[in-house]
Image (tube, rainbow, N blue to C red):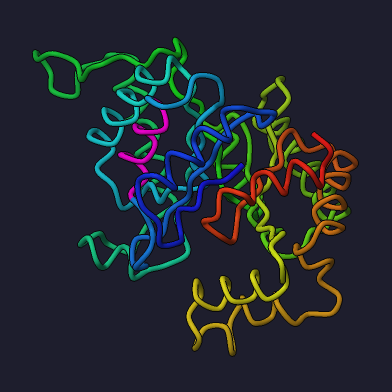
Amino acid sequence: MGLPTLFPHGRETELAWYRKIDEGPWDGLVTYERLLYPHSWSVVPQLAAAAAVTERVRLWTDVVTLPMRNPIMFAKELATIDVLSGGRLTLGVGIGAWDEDYIAVGSPLDRKRQRMDEAVASMRRVWAQQPPVEGHHPVGPAPNQAAGIPLVAGVVGPKALARAAQWAVGVSDPANSLHFDAEGLAAQRQRVIEAWQAAGRTEKPHFSTPIWFALGPDPESQLREHVRDFWDQEVVASGPAGSYLTAPTAGTLNCGPSALIAAVEGAREAGLDELRLIPTTADPDEIDRAREVLGI
């Protein structure tokens, strides 16, 4: 179950989401990021708060933009969260969708994929307690998870899958956020498996996807209003969000009870390891609605 990261809300609402999700039956809670957006929270303090308040669920990011960060500092922050949570953190990483986020923090736009590979290697050395400066102490703390924090790659294409197979535990496919396509996911899952095999890896790769969902009194308006705000009016008119909202062949729009049930059933049929439900409201009652619809 996702957090209401992209909506105006305060302390009590945020804590209510942590507690309701941790009560179950959800396997984890997930946050996600967009830097240049007025409502979005910062993932590091948000996950630290979730780690302190929850006891059971796994903590996820889906996904954070790795190449625009200092990997040594980020590795330290994440290791601290892993210790706070008792080893419950999984990190979803990608190159992000917005160049303006890079520009805002003074990060170059070139070699994003190569820089992500390099950042992963640096973070893994930090978590393995290898000093980044010769002759000096390592960066602490060490994560609770002995093998380091699991990394899931938010990637799609064949070249990106091949790169991810070198360092990730699996893949989060971002292509079903609005329209759930079980057949397409099953095909992509097979491509991920083949990429892992081509890299000489024998373990089964994790495969999952996020979807936005809406269950309020007018779920379609709830979803559409959120998407229009999130993507920007100019982008919606001519860009990817506009096509997602209007394409008649793109699959079922993820709003309303029947769409949520179909997505969960489709995820099982496609062989997904996990389906992450991203809310389109900050109302904590949306969690209860989802439980009721799914009968869990």
Please report the residue visible at 84 percent of the width from the left and 67 percent of the height from the top: 251
Report the magenta stretch's main SS: helix
Q: Quadrant of residue 130?
A: top left
User: What residue span does the magenta drawing correspond to?
Assistant: 42-51
Q: Where is 277 relative to 231, above or below?
A: above
Residue 37 on image: x %, y %: 37, 67
Q: Is residue 143 magenta?
A: no
Q: Residue furthest left?
A: 135
Q: Residue at the location (36% across, 52% down)?
A: 10
226 versus 171 height, above or below: below
**x, y (%) of residue 30?**
53, 41
Q: Is residue 148 left or right of residue 78?
A: right
Who is closer to the viewer here, 25 or 127?
Answer: 25
Kindly identify the residue that appears in the image at 59 percent across and 29 percent down. Answer: 169
Where, quadrant-wise, is the N terminus in this rendering? top right
Residue 255 in picture, x, y percent from top left: 75, 64
